[in-house]
Image (cartoon, helix red, strand yellow):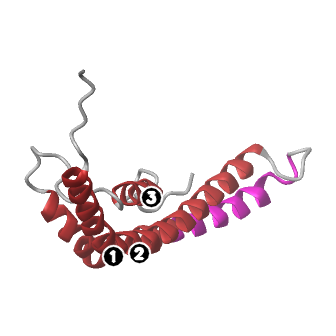
Amino acid sequence: MAKILNPILVRDPLESTAHRLHSMFQPIQKTKHKKSDYVAYVGTPLLDYFVLDAIFAIDVSIRLVNALASLLKAAYVWTLNQQKSDSLIDKETSRELDEFSENVSHIGSAIIAQFMNILLSTVSLVTRPIASIVELVSEDSSPSMSFAR
């Protein structure tokens, strides 16, 4: 494994995107005990634009360096082992190529997550207040139903 730098993001980058998608239609202050939901509602887009955007870009750069290192190491190992191995690609070269493809996959996921996080958190600035209004109206207009005779 040719890892030059340790990546910043070790979880799946799309996990944050799934969280934003899930909370996109939740009313603000959904829970009665949580005081910071409004801060999260306003702060998430700011963090996505100014902090997480840079973190995703740095992580993609690190993964790109590691992917290139894995690919170059795979080529080096292949030239050393091509005469010894019966198959075209030996196990050690295959491991390096797998590491290369894992880094490339993570790069693609991080770029998609970076774009989608900004998009979803910006859209949620509109959808969450609408969800709050809908919930408020539906609570006020629902008649108290009594089934007692």
Q: Is residue 79 within the magenta segment?
A: yes
Residue farthest top in this picture: 149
Mark 2 or mark 3, which is nearer to you?
2
Q: Earlier in the sequence, mark 2 or mark 3?
A: 3
Q: Could you say which disc has been placed on residue 122 in the image?
A: 1
Looking at the image, how many numbered discs can be counted on the residues? 3
Q: Is residue 132 left or right of residue 119?
A: left
Image spot of residue 132 (x, y percent)? 23, 61
What residue sits right under mark 2 in the picture? Answer: 119
Tag 3 secondary structure: loop
Q: Earlier in the sequence, mark 3 or mark 1?
A: 3
- Cα distance in 3D space between marks 2 and 3: 15 Å
Magenta stretch in the rendered image: 64-84
Task: Work out whether residue 14 can be spotted.
Answer: yes
Residue sitting at 30 percent across and 56 percent down? 26
Q: For the residue marked with disc 2, what is the amino acid?
A: Leu
Tag 1 secondary structure: helix
